[in-house]
Amino acid sequence: MKFIVDAHFPRRLSKWLNVRGYDSIHTSDLPKGNNTTDIEIIEKSIEETRIVITKDSDFLKYRVVKGEPDNILMVTTGNIINTELIKLFEENFKTITDFFESGKKVIELSNETVIVHS
């Protein structure tokens, strides 16, 4: 399972995924860094079969209209400190990966729960 972590999140999240054996890149690793456009992130996710981890609802809108990106992890926690974000991922990541492995395409991670949208 591969991921691309949007600029709204710290590099630490991408590194957290890498340490756990997942192939993860952060937008800051791309040639345009955190100035990479949403379309370029979507293209990268399609080229490399990556799940987009984002807070940006534009990715959901684009998926409704264009059917892309294939997989989105939408994080709807609002602004939280990095340690709380990582803790939330630690507590819920098994559930999230199970949903993606079962073919679900859009998963939401909130402060309280994990929700499957499709």
Image: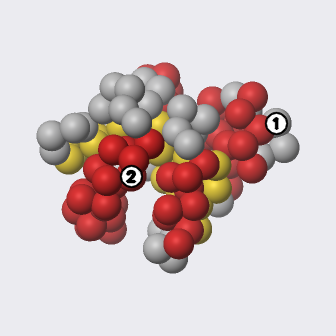
Name which residue type carries label 2.
Ile
Label 1 vs label 2, nearer the camera: 2
Provide the residue designation for mark 2.
86
Disc 1, disc 2: CB below 8 Å?
Answer: no
Is residue 36 at least partly visible in the picture?
yes
Colouring style:
secondary structure
Q: Residue at x 42, y 24 (%)?
A: 57
Provide the residue designation for mark 1.
32
In the image, is 13 to the left or to the right of 113?
A: right
User: Residue 15 lies in what quarter of the image?
Assistant: bottom right
User: Residue 27 lies in what quarter of the image?
Assistant: top right
Q: Residues within 10 Å of mark 1 (few under 14, many from 20)?
A: few
In the image, is 76 to the left or to the right of 69?
A: left
Q: Residue furthest right?
A: 31
73 versus 40 height, above or below: below
Name which residue type carries label 1.
Lys
In the image, is 68 to the left or to the right of 113?
A: right
Q: Residues within 10 Å of mark 2 (few under 14, many from 20)?
A: some
Q: Residue at x 15, y 40 (%)?
A: 112
Where residue 6 appears, as percent x and y from the top left, is 57, 39
Q: Earlier in the sequence, mark 1 or mark 2?
A: 1
User: Residue 109 lies in what quarter of the image?
Assistant: top left
Is residue 118 at least partly visible in the picture?
no
Viewer-proximal residue, 89 or 58? 89
